[in-house]
Image: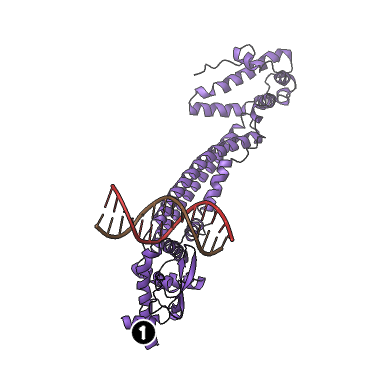
Chain colours: A purple, B red, C brown
Amino acid sequence: MLQQQPLTGNGPAGRGLGLSAHPALQALSSVHPSSQHRADGEPGLDGSENGLESRRDIGDILQQIMTITDQSLDEAQAKKHALNCHRMKPALFSVLCEIKEKTGLSMRSTQEEEPQDPQLVRLDNMLLAEGVAGPEKGGGAAAAVSAATSSGGMSPDSSLEHSDYKSKLSQIRTIYHTELEKYEQACSEFTTHVMNLLREQSRTRPVSPREIERMVAIIHRKFSSIQTQLKQSTCEAVMILRSRFLDARRKRRNFSKQATEVLNEYFYSHLSNPYPSEEAKEELAKQCGITMSQVSNWFGNKRIRYKKNISKFQEEANLYAMKTAIGATQSEESPQTPNSTGSGSFSLSGSADLFLGVPPMNGEQTPYHMGAQVPIPVNNSRFVLFPVSNFVVYMRRWL
DNA sequence: GATGATGATTCCGA
DNA sequence: TCGGAATCATCATC
Protein backbone atom coordinates (compact mmCIF):
# COMPACT_ATOMS: atom_id res chain seq x y z
CA MET A 1 0.00 0.00 0.00
CA LEU A 2 1.30 3.33 -1.00
CA GLN A 3 1.99 5.50 1.96
CA GLN A 4 0.01 8.69 1.57
CA GLN A 5 1.90 11.83 2.23
CA PRO A 6 0.51 15.12 3.42
CA LEU A 7 -0.20 17.37 0.51
CA THR A 8 0.91 20.53 2.10
CA GLY A 9 2.98 22.97 0.16
CA ASN A 10 6.12 21.70 1.84
CA GLY A 11 5.31 18.04 1.76
CA PRO A 12 7.01 15.72 -0.68
CA ALA A 13 3.74 14.70 -2.24
CA GLY A 14 2.75 18.27 -2.54
CA ARG A 15 5.99 19.02 -4.29
CA GLY A 16 5.54 16.04 -6.46
CA LEU A 17 2.13 17.09 -7.60
CA GLY A 18 3.03 20.71 -7.59
CA LEU A 19 -0.31 21.56 -6.16
CA SER A 20 0.71 24.17 -3.68
CA ALA A 21 2.97 25.77 -6.22
CA HIS A 22 0.31 25.67 -8.86
CA PRO A 23 -0.48 29.18 -10.10
CA ALA A 24 -4.15 28.46 -9.98
CA LEU A 25 -3.79 27.40 -6.40
CA GLN A 26 -1.83 30.49 -5.70
CA ALA A 27 -4.49 32.52 -7.39
CA LEU A 28 -7.08 30.68 -5.43
CA SER A 29 -5.62 32.15 -2.34
CA SER A 30 -6.39 35.61 -3.55
CA VAL A 31 -9.19 35.62 -6.06
CA HIS A 32 -11.50 32.73 -5.56
CA PRO A 33 -14.90 34.12 -4.62
CA SER A 34 -15.53 31.47 -2.08
CA SER A 35 -12.49 32.56 -0.25
CA GLN A 36 -13.01 36.27 -0.62
CA HIS A 37 -16.40 36.97 0.81
CA ARG A 38 -16.55 35.13 4.00
CA ALA A 39 -19.84 35.16 5.77
CA ASP A 40 -18.97 32.69 8.46
CA GLY A 41 -16.30 34.82 10.07
CA GLU A 42 -13.50 32.48 9.15
CA PRO A 43 -10.27 34.05 8.06
CA GLY A 44 -10.06 34.86 4.32
CA LEU A 45 -7.30 34.02 1.87
CA ASP A 46 -6.62 37.46 0.60
CA GLY A 47 -4.39 38.70 3.30
CA SER A 48 -0.84 37.61 3.87
CA GLU A 49 -1.75 36.71 7.37
CA ASN A 50 -4.43 34.35 6.25
CA GLY A 51 -2.55 33.10 3.24
CA LEU A 52 -0.52 30.61 5.14
CA GLU A 53 -3.55 29.43 6.98
CA SER A 54 -5.56 28.86 3.85
CA ARG A 55 -2.72 26.99 2.22
CA ARG A 56 -2.59 24.80 5.23
CA ASP A 57 -6.33 24.45 4.87
CA ILE A 58 -6.07 23.31 1.26
CA GLY A 59 -3.23 21.01 2.11
CA ASP A 60 -5.41 19.54 4.78
CA ILE A 61 -8.21 18.90 2.32
CA LEU A 62 -5.87 17.31 -0.17
CA GLN A 63 -4.48 15.08 2.49
CA GLN A 64 -7.96 14.02 3.45
CA ILE A 65 -8.75 13.23 -0.15
CA MET A 66 -5.59 11.22 -0.64
CA THR A 67 -6.10 9.20 2.50
CA ILE A 68 -9.75 8.56 1.90
CA THR A 69 -9.03 5.20 0.31
CA ASP A 70 -7.33 3.99 3.47
CA GLN A 71 -10.45 4.40 5.46
CA SER A 72 -13.40 2.17 5.94
CA LEU A 73 -16.39 2.62 3.70
CA ASP A 74 -18.45 4.34 6.34
CA GLU A 75 -15.60 6.61 7.28
CA ALA A 76 -14.90 7.35 3.68
CA GLN A 77 -18.54 8.16 3.01
CA ALA A 78 -18.63 10.44 5.97
CA LYS A 79 -15.38 12.07 4.94
CA LYS A 80 -16.63 12.45 1.41
CA HIS A 81 -19.74 14.15 2.62
CA ALA A 82 -17.68 16.44 4.80
CA LEU A 83 -15.42 17.28 1.91
CA ASN A 84 -18.36 18.01 -0.33
CA CYS A 85 -19.60 20.47 2.22
CA HIS A 86 -16.21 21.96 2.81
CA ARG A 87 -15.98 25.64 2.08
CA MET A 88 -12.85 25.15 0.00
CA LYS A 89 -14.29 22.45 -2.13
CA PRO A 90 -15.39 24.56 -5.15
CA ALA A 91 -12.02 26.26 -5.27
CA LEU A 92 -10.13 23.02 -5.03
CA PHE A 93 -12.39 21.49 -7.63
CA SER A 94 -11.67 24.24 -10.13
CA VAL A 95 -7.95 23.83 -9.52
CA LEU A 96 -8.15 20.12 -10.12
CA CYS A 97 -10.10 20.79 -13.31
CA GLU A 98 -7.42 23.12 -14.52
CA ILE A 99 -4.62 20.72 -13.68
CA LYS A 100 -6.44 17.94 -15.41
CA GLU A 101 -7.06 20.07 -18.46
CA LYS A 102 -3.38 20.89 -18.66
CA THR A 103 -2.11 17.39 -18.23
CA GLY A 104 -4.60 16.25 -20.84
CA LEU A 105 -4.57 12.73 -19.43
CA SER A 106 -8.28 12.44 -19.47
CA MET A 107 -8.57 13.54 -23.04
CA ARG A 108 -6.16 11.09 -24.51
CA SER A 109 -7.55 9.02 -27.31
CA THR A 110 -11.04 10.35 -26.93
CA GLN A 111 -11.02 11.25 -30.58
CA GLU A 112 -9.67 7.89 -31.61
CA GLU A 113 -12.34 6.41 -33.75
CA GLU A 114 -11.71 2.70 -33.78
CA PRO A 115 -12.00 1.37 -37.28
CA GLN A 116 -14.41 -1.54 -37.48
CA ASP A 117 -12.59 -4.80 -36.94
CA PRO A 118 -12.48 -6.63 -40.28
CA GLN A 119 -12.63 -9.96 -38.47
CA LEU A 120 -15.80 -8.86 -36.74
CA VAL A 121 -17.24 -7.75 -40.06
CA ARG A 122 -16.47 -11.14 -41.55
CA LEU A 123 -18.06 -12.91 -38.61
CA ASP A 124 -21.13 -10.71 -38.83
CA ASN A 125 -21.47 -11.34 -42.54
CA MET A 126 -21.04 -15.03 -42.09
CA LEU A 127 -23.61 -15.25 -39.31
CA LEU A 128 -25.97 -13.23 -41.45
CA ALA A 129 -25.43 -15.49 -44.45
CA GLU A 130 -25.92 -18.61 -42.37
CA GLY A 131 -29.16 -17.22 -41.00
CA VAL A 132 -27.91 -17.11 -37.42
CA ALA A 133 -27.78 -13.35 -37.16
CA GLY A 134 -30.40 -11.05 -38.56
CA PRO A 135 -34.07 -11.79 -39.09
CA GLU A 136 -34.97 -15.45 -39.11
CA LYS A 137 -36.04 -16.45 -42.56
CA GLY A 138 -34.43 -19.85 -42.93
CA GLY A 139 -31.20 -18.36 -44.17
CA GLY A 140 -28.82 -21.16 -43.29
CA ALA A 141 -31.31 -23.85 -44.00
CA ALA A 142 -32.10 -22.23 -47.30
CA ALA A 143 -28.40 -22.00 -48.01
CA ALA A 144 -28.00 -25.66 -47.20
CA VAL A 145 -30.91 -26.61 -49.42
CA SER A 146 -29.54 -24.44 -52.18
CA ALA A 147 -26.10 -26.02 -51.82
CA ALA A 148 -27.66 -29.44 -51.84
CA THR A 149 -29.85 -28.91 -54.85
CA SER A 150 -27.24 -27.11 -56.87
CA SER A 151 -24.74 -29.88 -56.45
CA GLY A 152 -26.77 -32.93 -57.04
CA GLY A 153 -29.93 -32.59 -55.05
CA MET A 154 -31.11 -34.40 -51.98
CA SER A 155 -32.66 -37.76 -51.74
CA PRO A 156 -35.95 -38.08 -49.87
CA ASP A 157 -33.94 -39.46 -46.96
CA SER A 158 -31.91 -36.32 -46.79
CA SER A 159 -35.02 -34.29 -46.07
CA LEU A 160 -34.79 -35.80 -42.60
CA GLU A 161 -31.16 -34.77 -42.36
CA HIS A 162 -32.18 -31.36 -43.59
CA SER A 163 -34.83 -30.93 -40.93
CA ASP A 164 -32.28 -32.07 -38.40
CA TYR A 165 -29.86 -29.50 -39.73
CA LYS A 166 -32.55 -26.86 -39.57
CA SER A 167 -33.46 -27.65 -35.97
CA LYS A 168 -29.81 -27.68 -34.89
CA LEU A 169 -29.18 -24.41 -36.66
CA SER A 170 -32.21 -23.03 -34.90
CA GLN A 171 -30.76 -24.16 -31.57
CA ILE A 172 -27.49 -22.45 -32.35
CA ARG A 173 -29.39 -19.33 -33.33
CA THR A 174 -31.37 -19.37 -30.08
CA ILE A 175 -28.27 -19.84 -27.94
CA TYR A 176 -26.43 -17.15 -29.87
CA HIS A 177 -29.21 -14.60 -29.43
CA THR A 178 -29.70 -15.47 -25.76
CA GLU A 179 -26.01 -15.05 -25.03
CA LEU A 180 -25.82 -11.91 -27.12
CA GLU A 181 -28.74 -10.47 -25.23
CA LYS A 182 -27.08 -11.36 -21.94
CA TYR A 183 -23.87 -9.67 -23.00
CA GLU A 184 -25.70 -6.60 -24.17
CA GLN A 185 -27.68 -6.41 -20.96
CA ALA A 186 -24.56 -6.87 -18.85
CA CYS A 187 -22.78 -4.26 -20.92
CA SER A 188 -25.65 -1.85 -20.51
CA GLU A 189 -25.88 -2.46 -16.77
CA PHE A 190 -22.17 -2.11 -16.28
CA THR A 191 -22.08 1.06 -18.37
CA THR A 192 -24.90 2.57 -16.37
CA HIS A 193 -23.16 1.60 -13.15
CA VAL A 194 -19.87 3.15 -14.23
CA MET A 195 -21.60 6.28 -15.48
CA ASN A 196 -23.40 6.66 -12.18
CA LEU A 197 -20.14 6.19 -10.34
CA LEU A 198 -18.42 8.76 -12.51
CA ARG A 199 -21.27 11.22 -12.11
CA GLU A 200 -21.11 10.79 -8.40
CA GLN A 201 -17.35 11.14 -8.43
CA SER A 202 -17.65 14.21 -10.59
CA ARG A 203 -18.88 15.98 -7.49
CA THR A 204 -15.53 15.53 -5.84
CA ARG A 205 -13.19 15.29 -8.79
CA PRO A 206 -13.30 16.69 -12.30
CA VAL A 207 -14.94 14.22 -14.63
CA SER A 208 -15.81 15.67 -17.99
CA PRO A 209 -18.56 14.31 -20.20
CA ARG A 210 -15.92 13.36 -22.75
CA GLU A 211 -14.15 11.35 -20.12
CA ILE A 212 -17.36 9.54 -19.37
CA GLU A 213 -17.81 8.90 -23.07
CA ARG A 214 -14.31 7.54 -23.24
CA MET A 215 -14.96 5.24 -20.32
CA VAL A 216 -18.16 4.02 -21.95
CA ALA A 217 -16.24 3.39 -25.15
CA ILE A 218 -13.68 1.35 -23.23
CA ILE A 219 -16.41 -0.73 -21.63
CA HIS A 220 -18.05 -1.28 -24.98
CA ARG A 221 -14.75 -2.34 -26.48
CA LYS A 222 -14.25 -4.87 -23.71
CA PHE A 223 -17.71 -6.29 -24.14
CA SER A 224 -17.28 -6.20 -27.89
CA SER A 225 -14.28 -8.50 -27.60
CA ILE A 226 -16.42 -10.92 -25.64
CA GLN A 227 -19.07 -10.69 -28.33
CA THR A 228 -16.44 -11.40 -30.94
CA GLN A 229 -15.53 -14.57 -29.10
CA LEU A 230 -19.19 -15.52 -28.97
CA LYS A 231 -19.56 -14.89 -32.69
CA GLN A 232 -16.43 -16.89 -33.41
CA SER A 233 -17.71 -19.83 -31.40
CA THR A 234 -21.08 -19.60 -33.13
CA CYS A 235 -19.43 -19.56 -36.53
CA GLU A 236 -17.38 -22.60 -35.63
CA ALA A 237 -20.49 -24.42 -34.46
CA VAL A 238 -22.30 -23.57 -37.70
CA MET A 239 -19.33 -24.69 -39.76
CA ILE A 240 -19.13 -28.00 -37.93
CA LEU A 241 -22.87 -28.51 -38.33
CA ARG A 242 -22.70 -27.60 -41.98
CA SER A 243 -19.79 -29.90 -42.73
CA ARG A 244 -21.57 -32.74 -40.98
CA PHE A 245 -24.68 -32.03 -43.00
CA LEU A 246 -22.70 -31.93 -46.24
CA ASP A 247 -20.84 -35.10 -45.33
CA ALA A 248 -24.12 -36.82 -44.71
CA ARG A 249 -25.38 -35.54 -48.04
CA ARG A 250 -22.27 -36.77 -49.75
CA LYS A 251 -22.84 -40.27 -48.45
CA ARG A 252 -23.88 -42.23 -51.47
CA ARG A 253 -26.86 -44.46 -51.43
CA ASN A 254 -27.75 -46.66 -54.31
CA PHE A 255 -31.05 -46.00 -55.95
CA SER A 256 -33.77 -48.51 -55.41
CA LYS A 257 -33.98 -51.42 -57.81
CA GLN A 258 -37.22 -50.09 -59.17
CA ALA A 259 -35.72 -46.67 -59.77
CA THR A 260 -32.76 -48.17 -61.62
CA GLU A 261 -35.12 -50.22 -63.73
CA VAL A 262 -37.16 -47.19 -64.69
CA LEU A 263 -34.02 -45.29 -65.64
CA ASN A 264 -32.58 -48.20 -67.59
CA GLU A 265 -35.83 -48.71 -69.43
CA TYR A 266 -35.84 -45.13 -70.50
CA PHE A 267 -32.19 -45.24 -71.42
CA TYR A 268 -32.37 -48.34 -73.58
CA SER A 269 -35.65 -47.38 -75.17
CA HIS A 270 -34.20 -44.00 -76.14
CA LEU A 271 -30.80 -45.20 -77.09
CA SER A 272 -30.84 -43.16 -80.29
CA ASN A 273 -31.02 -40.08 -78.17
CA PRO A 274 -30.51 -40.90 -74.50
CA TYR A 275 -30.94 -37.30 -73.45
CA PRO A 276 -34.19 -36.94 -71.58
CA SER A 277 -35.89 -33.59 -71.87
CA GLU A 278 -36.61 -31.52 -68.79
CA GLU A 279 -40.13 -32.89 -68.74
CA ALA A 280 -38.89 -36.45 -69.09
CA LYS A 281 -36.36 -35.89 -66.35
CA GLU A 282 -39.05 -34.52 -64.12
CA GLU A 283 -41.24 -37.51 -64.83
CA LEU A 284 -38.36 -39.93 -64.24
CA ALA A 285 -37.44 -38.13 -61.05
CA LYS A 286 -41.01 -38.47 -59.83
CA GLN A 287 -41.17 -42.13 -60.67
CA CYS A 288 -37.83 -42.92 -59.09
CA GLY A 289 -38.24 -40.71 -56.05
CA ILE A 290 -35.05 -38.85 -56.82
CA THR A 291 -34.24 -35.33 -57.92
CA MET A 292 -33.85 -34.13 -61.46
CA SER A 293 -30.17 -33.55 -60.79
CA GLN A 294 -29.81 -37.16 -59.82
CA VAL A 295 -31.56 -38.17 -63.00
CA SER A 296 -29.11 -36.02 -64.95
CA ASN A 297 -26.19 -37.55 -63.07
CA TRP A 298 -27.48 -41.01 -63.70
CA PHE A 299 -27.87 -40.44 -67.45
CA GLY A 300 -24.49 -38.75 -67.61
CA ASN A 301 -22.82 -41.68 -65.92
CA LYS A 302 -24.80 -44.18 -67.94
CA ARG A 303 -23.94 -42.64 -71.30
CA ILE A 304 -20.26 -42.52 -70.48
CA ARG A 305 -20.09 -45.99 -69.06
CA TYR A 306 -22.18 -47.43 -71.83
CA LYS A 307 -20.01 -45.91 -74.48
CA LYS A 308 -16.88 -47.03 -72.73
CA ASN A 309 -17.89 -50.65 -72.57
CA ILE A 310 -20.73 -51.48 -74.90
CA SER A 311 -20.16 -55.21 -74.81
CA LYS A 312 -20.46 -55.22 -71.07
CA PHE A 313 -23.90 -53.67 -71.30
CA GLN A 314 -25.00 -55.95 -74.12
CA GLU A 315 -26.85 -58.35 -71.91
CA GLU A 316 -28.50 -55.58 -69.99
CA ALA A 317 -29.50 -53.84 -73.18
CA ASN A 318 -31.05 -56.97 -74.58
CA LEU A 319 -32.87 -57.59 -71.38
CA TYR A 320 -34.44 -54.17 -71.35
CA ALA A 321 -35.18 -54.35 -75.04
CA MET A 322 -37.00 -57.55 -74.41
CA LYS A 323 -38.93 -56.10 -71.54
CA THR A 324 -39.88 -53.11 -73.58
CA ALA A 325 -40.89 -55.34 -76.45
CA ILE A 326 -43.11 -57.35 -74.18
CA GLY A 327 -44.67 -54.16 -73.00
CA ALA A 328 -45.16 -53.06 -76.57
CA THR A 329 -46.70 -56.35 -77.51
CA GLN A 330 -49.07 -56.24 -74.62
CA SER A 331 -50.13 -52.73 -75.38
CA GLU A 332 -50.55 -53.73 -79.02
CA GLU A 333 -52.84 -56.57 -78.05
CA SER A 334 -54.77 -54.67 -75.47
CA PRO A 335 -54.12 -50.97 -75.94
CA GLN A 336 -56.08 -50.09 -72.84
CA THR A 337 -53.81 -52.16 -70.61
CA PRO A 338 -51.00 -50.25 -68.97
CA ASN A 339 -47.65 -51.58 -69.97
CA SER A 340 -46.10 -54.05 -67.61
CA THR A 341 -42.56 -52.67 -67.72
CA GLY A 342 -43.31 -50.14 -65.10
CA SER A 343 -42.13 -47.40 -67.36
CA GLY A 344 -45.21 -45.41 -66.49
CA SER A 345 -45.90 -42.57 -68.82
CA PHE A 346 -42.89 -43.31 -71.00
CA SER A 347 -44.12 -43.66 -74.48
CA LEU A 348 -43.37 -46.95 -76.16
CA SER A 349 -43.94 -45.34 -79.47
CA GLY A 350 -40.22 -44.85 -79.49
CA SER A 351 -39.79 -48.55 -79.97
CA ALA A 352 -37.86 -47.71 -83.09
CA ASP A 353 -35.09 -46.87 -80.63
CA LEU A 354 -35.04 -50.35 -79.24
CA PHE A 355 -31.54 -51.55 -78.78
CA LEU A 356 -30.98 -54.89 -80.39
CA GLY A 357 -27.32 -55.53 -79.97
CA VAL A 358 -24.13 -54.85 -81.82
CA PRO A 359 -24.13 -55.18 -85.58
CA PRO A 360 -23.07 -58.64 -86.62
CA MET A 361 -19.48 -58.54 -87.61
CA ASN A 362 -19.80 -61.33 -90.14
CA GLY A 363 -22.55 -59.62 -92.04
CA GLU A 364 -25.03 -62.30 -91.03
CA GLN A 365 -28.50 -60.92 -90.89
CA THR A 366 -30.68 -61.67 -87.98
CA PRO A 367 -34.43 -61.73 -88.50
CA TYR A 368 -34.72 -58.28 -87.07
CA HIS A 369 -32.17 -56.57 -89.21
CA MET A 370 -34.50 -55.39 -91.83
CA GLY A 371 -36.59 -52.30 -91.99
CA ALA A 372 -36.41 -49.75 -89.25
CA GLN A 373 -33.07 -48.97 -87.79
CA VAL A 374 -31.88 -48.65 -84.27
CA PRO A 375 -28.98 -46.44 -83.37
CA ILE A 376 -26.12 -47.82 -81.37
CA PRO A 377 -23.02 -46.01 -80.34
CA VAL A 378 -19.80 -46.91 -82.10
CA ASN A 379 -16.25 -45.63 -82.08
CA ASN A 380 -16.81 -44.44 -78.57
CA SER A 381 -18.29 -41.21 -79.82
CA ARG A 382 -21.21 -41.44 -82.20
CA PHE A 383 -24.46 -43.32 -82.47
CA VAL A 384 -25.20 -45.14 -85.75
CA LEU A 385 -28.41 -46.65 -87.02
CA PHE A 386 -28.93 -50.37 -86.86
CA PRO A 387 -31.75 -52.22 -88.67
CA VAL A 388 -34.45 -53.56 -86.38
CA SER A 389 -37.54 -54.20 -88.44
CA ASN A 390 -39.99 -56.79 -87.22
CA PHE A 391 -38.23 -57.01 -83.91
CA VAL A 392 -41.48 -57.15 -82.02
CA VAL A 393 -42.72 -59.90 -84.24
CA TYR A 394 -39.48 -61.73 -83.84
CA MET A 395 -39.54 -61.40 -80.11
CA ARG A 396 -43.12 -62.56 -79.97
CA ARG A 397 -42.15 -65.68 -81.89
CA TRP A 398 -39.04 -66.14 -79.84
CA LEU A 399 -41.00 -65.97 -76.65
C1' DG B 1 -9.73 -56.48 -47.28
C1' DA B 2 -10.04 -56.61 -52.45
C1' DT B 3 -12.75 -55.50 -56.18
C1' DG B 4 -16.33 -53.93 -59.07
C1' DA B 5 -20.47 -51.05 -59.22
C1' DT B 6 -22.36 -46.72 -58.79
C1' DG B 7 -23.74 -42.00 -57.39
C1' DA B 8 -21.55 -37.52 -56.90
C1' DT B 9 -18.24 -34.04 -57.95
C1' DT B 10 -15.15 -31.37 -60.67
C1' DC B 11 -13.08 -29.60 -64.73
C1' DC B 12 -13.31 -28.36 -69.38
C1' DG B 13 -15.17 -27.22 -73.85
C1' DA B 14 -18.95 -26.09 -76.95
C1' DT C 1 -25.76 -24.10 -69.17
C1' DC C 2 -25.21 -28.68 -70.57
C1' DG C 3 -22.71 -32.75 -71.53
C1' DG C 4 -18.30 -35.47 -71.70
C1' DA C 5 -14.66 -37.18 -69.22
C1' DA C 6 -12.04 -38.14 -65.25
C1' DT C 7 -12.06 -38.89 -60.67
C1' DC C 8 -13.58 -39.49 -55.96
C1' DA C 9 -15.99 -41.82 -52.37
C1' DT C 10 -19.02 -45.09 -50.87
C1' DC C 11 -21.67 -49.33 -51.31
C1' DA C 12 -22.13 -54.26 -52.16
C1' DT C 13 -20.35 -58.58 -52.81
C1' DC C 14 -17.11 -62.03 -52.31
Secondary-structure class at tag 1: helix
**Quarter location, residue A158:** bottom left
Residue assigned mark 1: A330
Q: Residue at x 54, y 23 (%)?
A: A68
Q: Residue at x 47, y 47 (%)?
A: A234
Q: Position of residue A91 (x, y in %)?
A: 68, 25
Image quadrant where one finds the C terminus of chain A? bottom left
Mark 1 is surrounded, within 10 Å at the Cα level, by few (under 14), some (14 to 19) or many (20 or more) other residues, namely some
Q: As shown in the figure, which amino acid type bears the numbered disc 1?
A: Gln
Horizontal side, residue A60 vs residue A142: left or right: right
Whether residue A142 is visible, yes or no, is: no
Closer to the camera in the image, A364 or A212: A364
Front one among A282 and A17:
A282
- Where in the figure is residue A277, as x and y percent of width and height? 51, 71
Evaluate whether residue A58 shows in this view. yes
Answer above or below: position of A247 versus A193. Answer: below
Chain containing mark 1: A
